[in-house]
């Protein structure tokens, strides 16, 4: 068969930029160095492109595993809606204790803002979104804008503040012992840890009325991070007068596929566009 057809370009074509180095850290017992990288889904044609929102997506893994590539297929939906996606690798707990993970996330945010044109990014519309351990970090990043205690890496003069946070089934109070997932020990890899240390890794410790808007998702049947964690986060944000939306997803356990369906994506896209 031979046939000529006419095609109308109805949507913007996206491209994948993989393994972009954004920060140098110590490695092998701090005896050498390595580069932390990020992946990005961004417009193929970037020259003269209008700035657009950015979602910095943080993979979960209980602070013991990270794969910045794993969820990129599910991020395409957001890219096609006109949102640049950035997925950075951050150090796990066995590589470096907290707050190394938060330092890495903030360095990634600063890198994107400092190179906004390269990412077609609007520097005033950078959002942080994550699942599980990534949700913990998204909350902390949003709650600690430009805090000098959490600045490490390039572009220290660039702001790491975000326009909003979108945590999926995360913990906001690390002082609460969650025996099913043992998140406290994961957060402070090895040895004993103090109440002060667990508070230092809790977003509740830092939240103020100046926090950016939050969009929270949590499964009603979560067996790893109790849904009460998001209930507590919602209550505190409401008390502070911070704009917050909270969706308790009926019947969903930790990391279920329901969190990656169109109903959820539609809510997230609306939230990002609104702010």
Image (spheres, rainbow, N blue to C red):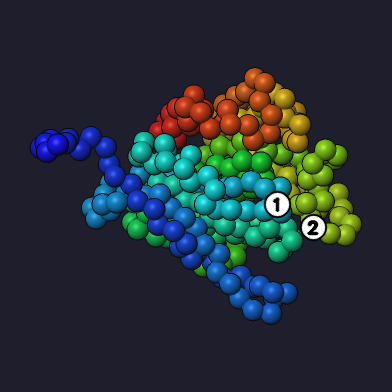
**Label drawn at residue 63:** 1
Q: Residue at x 69, y 80 (%)?
A: 31
Mark 1, other Cα within 10 Å: few <14 / some 14–19 / many ≥20? many
Quarter of the view holding residue 215: top right
Which residue is farthest front? 1
Q: Residue at x 55, y 42 (%)?
A: 129
- CB under 8 Å between discs 1 and 2: yes
Which residue is farthest top? 250
Asked whether residue 216 is in view, the answer is no
The image shows residue 135 at horizontal and vertical percentages of: 63, 42
143 or 185: nearer the viewer: 185
At mark 1, the secondary structure is loop
Would residue 129 be found to the left or right of residue 198 on screen? Answer: left
Give the quarter of the figure containing the C terminus: top left
Residue that numbered label 2 is attached to: 189
Quarter of the view holding residue 3: top left
The image shows residue 174 at horizontal and vertical percentages of: 78, 43
The image shows residue 96 at horizontal and vertical percentages of: 71, 63
Establish if 205 lies above or below 92.
Answer: above
The CA span between labels 1 and 2 is: 9 Å
At mark 2, the secondary structure is loop
* Precedes in sequence: disc 1 or disc 2: 1
Which residue is farthest right? 192
11 or 111: nearer the viewer: 11
Would residue 100 be found to the left or right of residue 118 on screen? Answer: right
Establish if 54 lies above or below 64.
Answer: above
């Amino acid at each position: 068969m031979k046939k000529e057809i006419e095609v109308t370009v109805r949507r913007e074509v996206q491209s994948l930029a993989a393994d972009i180095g954004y920060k140098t850290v110590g490695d092998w017992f701090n005896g050498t160095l390595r580069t932390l990288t990020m992946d990005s889904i961004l417009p193929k044609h970037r020259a003269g492109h209008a700035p657009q929102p950015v979602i910095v997506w943080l993979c979960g893994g209980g602070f013991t595993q990270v794969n910045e590539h794993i969820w990129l297929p599910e991020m395409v939906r957001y890219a096609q809606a006109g949102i640049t996606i950035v997925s950075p690798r951050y150090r796990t707990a066995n590589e470096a204790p907290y707050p190394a993970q938060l330092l890495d996330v903030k360095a990634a945010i600063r890198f994107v803002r400092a190179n906004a044109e390269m990412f077609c990014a609007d520097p005033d519309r950078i959002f942080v979104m994550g699942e599980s351990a990534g949700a913990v970090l998204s909350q902390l990043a949003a709650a600690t804008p430009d805090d000098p205690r959490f600045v490490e890496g390039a572009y220290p003069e660039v702001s790491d503040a975000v326009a909003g946070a979108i945590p999926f089934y995360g913990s906001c109070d690390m002082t609460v012992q969650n025996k099913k997932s043992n998140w406290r020990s994961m957060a402070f890899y090895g040895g004993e840890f103090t109440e002060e240390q667990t508070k230092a890794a809790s977003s509740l410790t830092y939240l103020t009325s100046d926090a950016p808007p939050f969009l929270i998702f949590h499964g009603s049947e979560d067996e790893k991070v109790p849904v009460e964690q998001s209930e507590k986060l919602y209550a505190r944000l409401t008390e502070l007068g911070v704009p917050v939306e909270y969706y308790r997803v009926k019947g969903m356990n930790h990391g279920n596929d329901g969190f990656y369906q169109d109903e959820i994506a539609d809510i997230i896209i609306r939230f990002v566009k609104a702010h």
